Image (cartoon, rainbow, N blue to C red):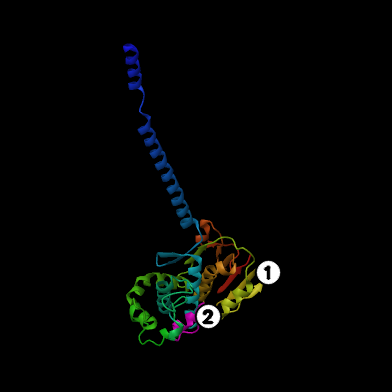
Amino acid sequence: MPASRGRRVVLAEEQPRRGPRWVARVLVLSLVALLGLGAWFGGRSLFDTVLGARCQATAGGNSVQFDPEQMSNAATITAIALRRGLPARAATIALATAIQESKLRNIRYGDRDSVGLFQQRPSQGWGTVEQILEPEYTTNKFYDALVKIKGWENDTITVVAQKVQRSAYPEAYADHEQEGRILASSLAGHSPRGVACRLNEPEGEADVALIGRLLTSEYALRPTAARGTLTVDAPSDQIAWSIASWSVAKAVDTGITGVTIGDRRWVRSRESSAWTWARTDAPAPGQQVILHLG
């Protein structure tokens, strides 16, 4: 009996203590799983950021990126400045203001009754809600107020934008001046090949009627239709490049699949090739922009 009890004691002492080790293993496996899940979500976020639909504007060696909706609205703001014969400075001020007020989105909400790209208020006489939510209308109203300000061409953007907007945070407009300059220069045609967008394939056919209406309202130009293309005759090389850049920025709305100007062509794609204006073997005549529709 004493020997038997001694053997049982030895066996008991030799048995491993499994509880703490299994807990440690479970904790390690859980940590690995969490890290893997985080890496997957992080990689997906990085994929969406790097490879998702994006637009880029480049001028003077500097670039800014926005999503297609924002770039489309920036193109409208710039084109209307050109149509009105205003200098690039006007577009810079308007763009910086819209970035601050709405992040270049045509939103239906804001402080009190503010709406739209510039967060204009119906109660302050800017127009009805429906009018302010029309990008062409609200942009023209901004420029109507801008050109009435004495010295707007040379005064600081903070002072000028504040006189137009009467904002509670006027110093914030200056934060977006460089973005406004880059957008204005590239979209106004002063920086050729300065606008490119990487986009999904269009869901349907290009909206020819919409393209024509927008060109008329924003540039006072009418395109000429041919099989699978629209051709726009511009009054100068600068305006031609502005229309080409505008067409890329508006591709998300209109279904345009390519733009040719001179010996350069932008082709709609999700690939990195969409960031560049490649040389083409079928150039467009001088001061003409060819919009490809399919």
User: 222 above or below 182?
Assistant: below
The residue singled out by tag 2 in the image is 130
Q: Chief secondary structure of the magenta span? A: helix
Quadrant placement of the C terminus: bottom right
Seen at 64% across and 69% down, the residue is 229
Label tally = 2
The residue nearer to you, when weighing 115 against 185, is 115
Give residue 271's position: percent from left, percent from top: 53, 56
User: 162 above or below 22?
Assistant: below
On residue 227, which mark appears? 1
Q: Quadrant of residue 169 in the image? A: bottom left
The residue nearer to you, when weighing 214 against 103, is 103
The residue nearer to you, when weighing 226 against 205, is 205
Amino acid type assigned to the residue bearing label 2 in the image = Glu
Seen at 57% across and 71% down, the residue is 289
Span highlighted in magenta in the image: 125-143
Asked if residue 285 can be seen in this view, the reply is: no
Mark 2, Cα crowd under 10 Å, few <14 / some 14-19 / many 20+, is few
Give residue 15's position: percent from left, percent from top: 36, 23
Asked if residue 129 can be seen in this view, the reply is: yes
